[in-house]
Image (cartoon, coloured by chain):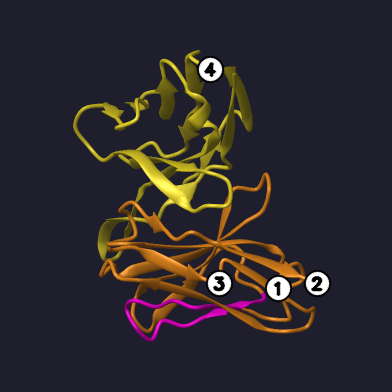
Chain colours: A orange, B yellow
Amino acid sequence: DGGITQSPKYLFRKEGQNVTLSCEQNLNHDAMYWYRQDPGQGLRLIYYSQIVNDFQKGDIAEGYSVSREKKESFPLTVTSAQKNPTAFYLCASSWTPYNEQFFGPGTRLTVL
Amino acid sequence: AQSVTQLDSQVPVFEEAPVELRCNYSSSVSVYLFWYVQYPNQGLQLLLKYLSGSTLVESINGFEAEFNKSQTSFHLRKPSVHISDTAEYFCAVSAPTTNAGGTSYGKLTFGQGTILTVHP
């Protein structure tokens, strides 16, 4: 089955710790994205990558980092510099930037 | 920069009633348009899309949207809703940008979402 997987589904971390969210796709898509979703604020783009070994900041990149070493993988690290990391995080991929995006099931991060 | 406005943050409606979720975008040139649906604690699923051709596009579960270039709108409609349609709906747009390399379509910009609640 082709699709996007995100793990874990729920994640808890203590304040001051870095944490990495996983995103894997087997759709052979070139472009991948990370979004943050908070109630009433829609989707906000954190980072995106159009090709392996290249990525660009989105609208709210501060306190986050990414890597794109493999076409199928685009992990997101939430660093201790992120002031308010508790949120629902969504990963997506697409053939090209303007094609429809396919979304993973999301990871809900809670900072204790 | 392109922008998308979903005019209603929440739309309550009774079961079997018609519904319209409104979406306007800012670009004055040809665009690609999308509607997504999100059920609680899940990712987004593509509902329908407009790339070119017929301005009326339909989904498999009874939703339809009409591209109106003069009004820069892409409203989503359903003639009779079900309880199971309760979800959040997002409109998205991709508009062309021109630089030294030519014209290309950019990544999607999403609206703020409309929560549709269907009451029995």
Q: Amino acid at mark 4?
A: Glu
Please tell me the numbered disc located at residue B15. 4
Q: Amino acid at mark 3?
A: Pro
Q: Identify residue for label 3.
A: A8
- Front position in the image: B97 or B63: B63
Residue at 38% from the left image edge and 65% from the top image edge: A4
B63 in relation to A2, above or below:
above
Residue at 37% from the left image edge and 27% from the top image edge: B63
- The numbered mark, 2 or 1, whose residue comes first in the sequence reads 1
Number of residues whose C-alpha sits closer than 10 Å to that of mark 4, classed few (under 14), some (14–19) or many (20 or more): some
Residue at 48% from the left image edge and 69% from the top image edge: A6
Q: Magenta span has B34?
A: no
Q: CA distance from mark 1 to mark 3?
A: 10 Å
Q: Secondary structure at mark 1?
A: strand
Task: Mark 2 vs mark 1: tell me if same chain.
Answer: yes
Q: CA distance from mark 2 to mark 1?
A: 7 Å
Q: Find residue A24 and report its image quarter.
A: bottom left
**Residue B26 appears at what percent x and percent y?**
47, 38
Circles 2 and 1: CB distance less than 8 Å? yes
Magenta stretch? A63-77
- The numbered mark, 2 or 3, whose residue comes first in the sequence reads 3
Name the magenta segment's main secondary structure. Answer: loop
Task: Give the letter of the chain under mark 2.
Answer: A
- Front position in the image: B102 or A82: A82
Number of residues whose C-alpha sits closer than 10 Å to that of mark 1, classed few (under 14), some (14–19) or many (20 or more): few
Q: Identify residue for label 2.
A: A112
Q: How many marks?
A: 4
